[in-house]
Image: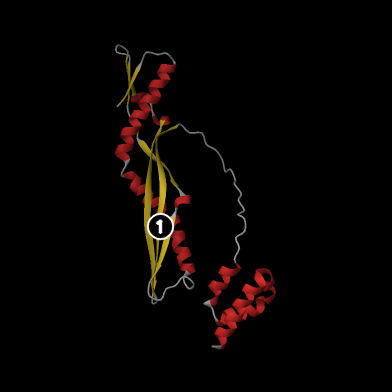
Amino acid sequence: MRTLNISLLALGLVVVVGRAEAQSYLPALTKVVRKAPALLELLDELTSQDKPARVKTLLKGALGEEKLVAWTTKLDVQASRTQSNWRGEVTVTMTVPAQVSYHVDLGKVLPSNLKYDSGKRILRVKMPAVELGEVSAVLKDLDMSTSYGRMRFSFTDHRTVARLKRELLRDDFDTQARELARGQQTAARNAARTVLQRFLQRSFDAARAEVTVVVE
C-alpha cells in the first residue's frame, strides 16, 4: 500500500508540474518506478513527445539498364510470427500491400532471336524471358497487430514484439511477396508479349519502315 501511495504521488507530480519541471525530480521518480515497474508505461505516456524526424538521403549510384517494364501487379503480403515461453505466447501479425514489377531485358534479345521475312515484310521476334523485378512495400498502408496470451503483456514484452516486427519486415516480407508473385508469371508473360510487340512496332512505325512485328 505504501508503494502504491508513493507511486500515485509521483504520477500526480508529473501531471501537476509538467514534463519539464518533473525532470528535476528524476532521481526520486526513478526510485519509485523501480518499486512499481507497472507505473513506467503510464509515466512514459504522460511525458512522451515525438521530435521531428531527421532524414538524410544518400545517392549510392545509378546504373543504365535496357529493361522494359511489361507488367505490374498489386498484392497483400500477410505473415505472422509467434514467440512462446512459460508465461504464454506473443503473436505479431502483419499485412503489407506491395507492388511487384515484371520486365523484359532488351539486352538479351539477340540477332538469333530475330527472323525477317523480306517477302511478307514480317519481323518475328522470339519472346525473351520475363523477369521478376522490384518488390516494393507500400509502407503507408502497413498494418500490424499484436496479441498477448495468458501472462504476456505489452509492458513486459515490448522488446519481443519489436524483434518479431523487425523479422517480419526484414525476413518474411520479400520472401512471401516473391512467392506470391511467381504465381503470376504466366499472366505476366502474356502481358509482356503484347507490350514488347507494341514497343517494337512503334519503333518501326516512327522510322516509316513498312515492317510488321510479331512476337512469338
Residue ID at (45%, 60%): 165
Q: Which residue lies furthest to the front in this view?
A: 16
Q: Position of residue 27 (x, y in %)?
A: 66, 78
Please state which amino acid type lies under the numbered disc 1.
Met
Which of the two residues, 117 or 80, is positioned nearer the viewer here?
Answer: 80
Eyeballing the image, is 71 above or below 91? above
**Residue 134 pos. (x, y %):** 43, 43
Dot 1 falls on a residue whose secondary structure is strand
Say which quadrant the N terminus sits in.
bottom right
Pinpoint residue 53: horizontal percent, then vertical percent: 60, 54
Residue shown at 45%/51% (left/top)? Answer: 141
Label 1: how many Cα within 10 Å (few below 14, some 14–19, many 20+): many
Occupied quadrant, residue 9: bottom right
Image side of residue 205 versus residue 190, left or right: right
Residue displayed at 40% across by 54% down: 95
- Where residue 68 appears, x then y in whole percent? 42, 32
Vertical order, 171 against 178 (above or below): below
When asked about the image quadrant of residue 49, the answer is: bottom right
Q: In this view, does 115 lie to the left or right of 49?
A: left
Q: Where 57 falls versus 88 (above or below)?
A: above
Viewer-closest of 181 and 48 = 48
The C terminus: image quadrant: top left
In depth, the one of 183 and 12 nearer the eye is: 12
Compared across the picture, whether 42 is left or right of 26 comes to left
In terms of depth relative to the viewer, which is nearer, 37 or 132?
Answer: 37
Residue position marked by numbered label 1 in the rendering: 94
- Vertical side of 81 occupied by 182: above or below: above
Q: Residue at x 61, y 49 (%)?
A: 56
